[in-house]
């Protein structure tokens, strides 16, 4: 990368002046603040909140990771109606649903030609059922988007651990990409352990990614390391102190063939991992040879397990709402898993919880207080927004959004009322929900540092 080569040559040169160094860092920050998302990444960010559905023979065995030796006869969701899933998901305000078309046990929830370890061997609809098709149809009818999870790790297929497995996997992927309408996401699971022959597989992600781009160019690809959406590093709803969607490309998967032939985790940044607290911070990106846009998804299940276990209870409304605030309101999307029971229905307790969560989100964010906002510049990439309400009001939240189509820029900000600091923030990005809980008539949002001119898409007070 030109800018980086220039940067290092200046920094390493003996003749560098302080002024030149500052100019170089400013240039680099401007570059970082102008790394732009693709259209599909922008559409994904706008979805904000969507559902995972984990359903497989595990639902019937009580396992979380099936062995691959399960008898397909156990998979028989006699009361399945995917329209009820969609209703429940919509009641929480979610905009999409991703189904585990195949989990690690290798059992396929669709009419595949690739294996008989699938719906064809299940008693459900006498072997003619197609859960992927039913879910896709219900989502389309209900007006939400649909996505698929296809586990690369397969504990059933005998080819696993050989190059033929990549052909098999691509054939499965192609069926899902071409037979079930538009997909908004393909979700790759990072788990990679031994298959039935004790061998591990070298996944041909270049091929998988090319196939997705060919058949579903608008779908984002989730994988531990992107390319479009990356994992936040935990499965329990944890969020980062500062969430940057612009990260070193060394952390992200990129297809071979173009200029991007760099595998994840290499070079000066080989020590880093997705779960690190500061992957987008200046102290790390400075060492990257190039930056890419790759937002993070926060995923967790509504109960401790990804699959249904009768003995487990859903988490509390407070925990789910708090995760929503920190994920959707923390420059991420929130993927919340709900697990159907053996009969194919969601547990009534989960359905109630989703409804309650939806109501709470609506109540909190549907009625902005009317206010005026005045912007004032305050030096390079710094500015102040003075917010005046019509009268003194209890303010629960201030919600800020950057125009990330231009890039992510805000590094630090505060929200003040008079002399008191009510909120100290780092990044904003797609959306930052700031808890305020104070009765005030005016507020000041003070953007104290940015990587380039700060452009806010929205400021709302609730
Ligand atoms: C993990 C898997 O091993 C879990 O079973 C689950 O599917 C979760 C979403 O991803 O890596």
Image: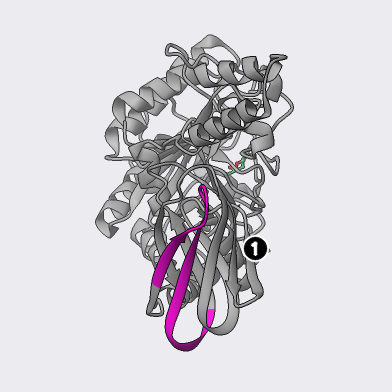
The image shows residue 106, relative to residue 199, as above or below, that is below
Residue where numbered disc 1 is placed: 424
Residue displayed at 44% across by 17% down: 207
Residue 238: x and y, percent?
Answer: 66, 53
Would you say 78 lies left or right of 433 here? left
Would you say 9 lies left or right of 169 here? right
Tell me which segment is drawn in magenta: 373-395
Residue 280: x and y, percent?
Answer: 61, 39
Q: Quadrant of residue 376?
A: bottom left
Q: Residues within 10 Å of mark 1 (few under 14, many from 20)?
A: few
Q: Nearer the viewer, residue 283 or 323?
A: 283
Residue displayed at 59% across by 82% down: 438
Secondary structure mostly seen in magenta is: strand
Would you say 336 lies left or right of 11 here? left
Type of colouring = one colour
- Residue 314 visible from this viewpoint: no
Residue 54: x and y, percent?
Answer: 52, 48
Q: Nearer the viewer, residue 127 or 298?
A: 298
Q: Nearer the viewer, residue 60 or 13?
A: 13
Provide the secondary structure element on which disc 1 rests: strand
Report whether the residue tagged 1 is closer than 8 Å to ligand 1.
no
The image shows residue 177, relative to residue 142, as above or below, that is above
């Amino acid at each position: 990368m030109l800018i980086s080569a220039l940067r290092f040559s200046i920094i390493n040169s003996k003749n560098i002046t302080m002024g030149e160094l500052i100019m170089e860092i400013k240039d680099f920050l401007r570059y970082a603040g102008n790394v732009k998302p693709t259209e599909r990444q922008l559409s994904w960010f706008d979805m904000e909140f969507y559902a995972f559905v984990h359903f497989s023979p595990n639902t019937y065995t009580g396992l979380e990771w099936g062995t691959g030796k399960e008898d397909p006869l156990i998979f028989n969701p006699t009361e399945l109606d995917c329209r009820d899933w969609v209703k429940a998901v919509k009641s929480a305000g979610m905009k999409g649903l991703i189904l585990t078309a195949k989990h690690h046990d290798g059992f396929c929830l669709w009419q595949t030609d690739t294996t008989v370890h699938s719906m064809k061997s299940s008693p459900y609809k006498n072997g003619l059922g197609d859960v992927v098709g039913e879910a896709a149809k219900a989502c389309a009818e209900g007006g939400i988007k649909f996505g698929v999870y296809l586990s690369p790790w397969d504990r059933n297929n005998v080819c696993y651990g050989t190059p033929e497995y990549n052909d098999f996997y691509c054939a499965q992927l192609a069926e899902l990409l071409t037979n079930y309408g538009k997909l908004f996401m393909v979700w790759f699971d990072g788990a990679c352990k031994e298959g039935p022959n004790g061998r591990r597989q070298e996944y041909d992600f270049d091929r998988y990614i090319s196939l997705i781009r060919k058949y579903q160019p608008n779908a984002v690809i989730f994988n531990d390391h992107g390319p479009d959406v990356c994992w936040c590093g935990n499965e329990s709803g944890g969020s980062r102190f500062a969430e940057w969607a612009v990260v070193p490309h060394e952390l992200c998967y990129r297809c071979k063939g173009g200029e991007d032939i760099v595998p994840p985790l290499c070079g000066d940044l080989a020590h880093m991992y997705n779960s690190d607290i500061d992957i987008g911070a200046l102290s790390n990106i400075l060492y990257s040879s190039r930056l890419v846009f790759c937002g993070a998804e926060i995923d967790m299940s509504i109960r401790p397990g990804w699959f249904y276990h009768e003995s487990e209870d859903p988490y509390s409304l407070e925990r789910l709402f708090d995760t929503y605030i920190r994920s959707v309101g923390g420059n991420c999307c929130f993927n919340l898993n709900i697990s159907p029971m053996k009969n194919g229905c969601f547990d009534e307790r989960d359905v109630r919880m989703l409804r309650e969560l939806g109501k709470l989100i609506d109540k909190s964010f549907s009625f902005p207080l009317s206010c005026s906002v005045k912007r004032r510049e305050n030096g390079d990439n710094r500015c102040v927004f003075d917010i005046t309400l019509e009268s003194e009001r209890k303010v629960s939240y201030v919600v800020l959004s950057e125009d990330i189509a231009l890039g992510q820029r805000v590094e630090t900000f505060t929200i003040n009322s008079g002399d008191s600091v009510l909120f100290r923030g780092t990044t904003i990005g797609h959306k930052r929900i700031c808890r305020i809980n104070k009765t005030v008539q005016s507020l000041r949002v003070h953007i104290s540092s940015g990587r380039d001119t700060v452009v806010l898409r929205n400021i709302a007070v609730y």
